[in-house]
Amino acid sequence: MAILPTHRPRRNRKSEVIRNMVQETNLTTHDFIYPLFLIEGQNQTLEVSSMPGIHRFTADRLIDEIGQAVELGIKAFAPFPSINDALKDRLAKESANPEGLYLKTVADIKRQFPDVVIMTDVAMDPYSSDGHDGVVDAESGEILNDASLEVLGQMALAQARAGADIIGPSDMMDGRVAWIRDVLDRNAFSHVSIMSYTAKYASAFYGPFRDALDSAPKKGDKKSYQMNPANKREALRELALDEQEGADMVMVKPALSYLDVIHVVKENTHLPVTAYNVSGEYAMIKAAARNGWVDGEKTMMEVLLSIKRAGADAILTYFAKEAAEVLRRG
């Protein structure tokens, strides 16, 4: 006689009510940070061809987009600027211009939506004539770490003055968290948080983002400062340094191909962990859905759930608005 099973895990799956009751991971709109692309001009909304459904907004239209997202329950935003080439130079001076596109828009967002959280990006590449996240030596092409810190510190200070709630150093220069923390504290911005891009990998998944902002390096690549995709233990070294230097939150980027890194970072810190569901990850799902190969909505929600399940407390995702609409429908 066959021995029937004593333990039956399926009993906890037998109805939707029970499945919901024992569900271990839940998504809400509080989990999302919505990245937005900002361009010069007025009354323009331009779709990013490699990111169906995602647009580049002039400041006035970006304000409208934030208003719509707030209505859906999204309260955190990360704007990224596309800067006119004529304003770019090797020292990214435009990044600290209070009358420039980015800082004026950040200030305007905070005036109109004082209760939302604005996370700003600290890296030189949108403003650099070289397209790199740090200062490039004109002769050798080397990315000069310590010379970059001064630029990044002034950029962070200008963003804090504009009203940024969270500073997001995405440059991966050594020591930049301590440098920025010191600059902010010395200038009476000790209340401004730092969400460090702790483990930012030299990934192939950034292509659509660089298309949207025209921010690809003019020469070379970013492998001398972004992390090797083969490495996981190295993320823990970066984590330890960011904690020592005063980071308030830490990030893993990209997310979907680095779920193991998100998990190991979460297991080794008491700081909030965020993950960036990047442009290439978004584009893959949209492309597959448009070809009828996957159910786009279900795949989107499964991916976001997997990122949170891996350990992310918050997720930067281009799916934020679309996912919020799904969550609203229940």
Image: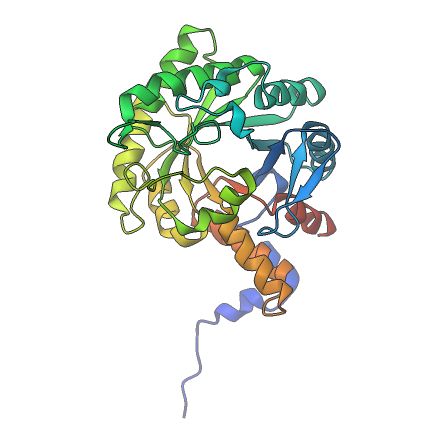
User: According to the image, what is the colour scheme of the structure?
Assistant: rainbow
The mark total stands at: 0
Q: Residue 128: image x %, image y %?
A: 43, 28
| 43 to the left or right of 310 | right
Please tell me which residue is depicted at 35% across the width and 39% down the height of the picture: 219
Give whichever of 141, 286 is nearer the camera: 141
Q: Residue 108: image x %, image y %?
A: 67, 19
**Vertical side of 225 occupied by 147: above or below:** above
**Vertical side of 220 occupied by 103: above or below:** above
The part of the image, by quadrant, that contains residue 71 is top right
Please tell me which residue is depicted at 52% across the width and 18% down the height of the picture: 159
Please tell me which residue is depicted at 56% across the width and 42% down the height of the picture: 212
For this orientation, the residue located farthest to the bottom is 1
Answer whether residue 305 is visible to the viewer in this image. no
Please tell me which residue is depicted at 72% across the width and 47% down the height of the picture: 328
Give whichever of 20, 69 is nearer the camera: 69
Q: Residue 245: image x %, image y %?
A: 31, 22
Q: Residue 117: image x %, image y %?
A: 59, 26
Give whichever of 154, 260 is nearer the camera: 154
The part of the image, by quadrant, that contains residue 123 is top left
**Vertical side of 207 occupied by 297: above or below:** below
| 9 to the left or right of 48 | left
The part of the image, by quadrant, that contains residue 146 is top left
| 174 to the left or right of 163 | left
Answer whether residue 3 is visible to the viewer in this image. yes
Give whichever of 314, 225 is nearer the camera: 225
Which of the image's four quarters has the N terminus? bottom left
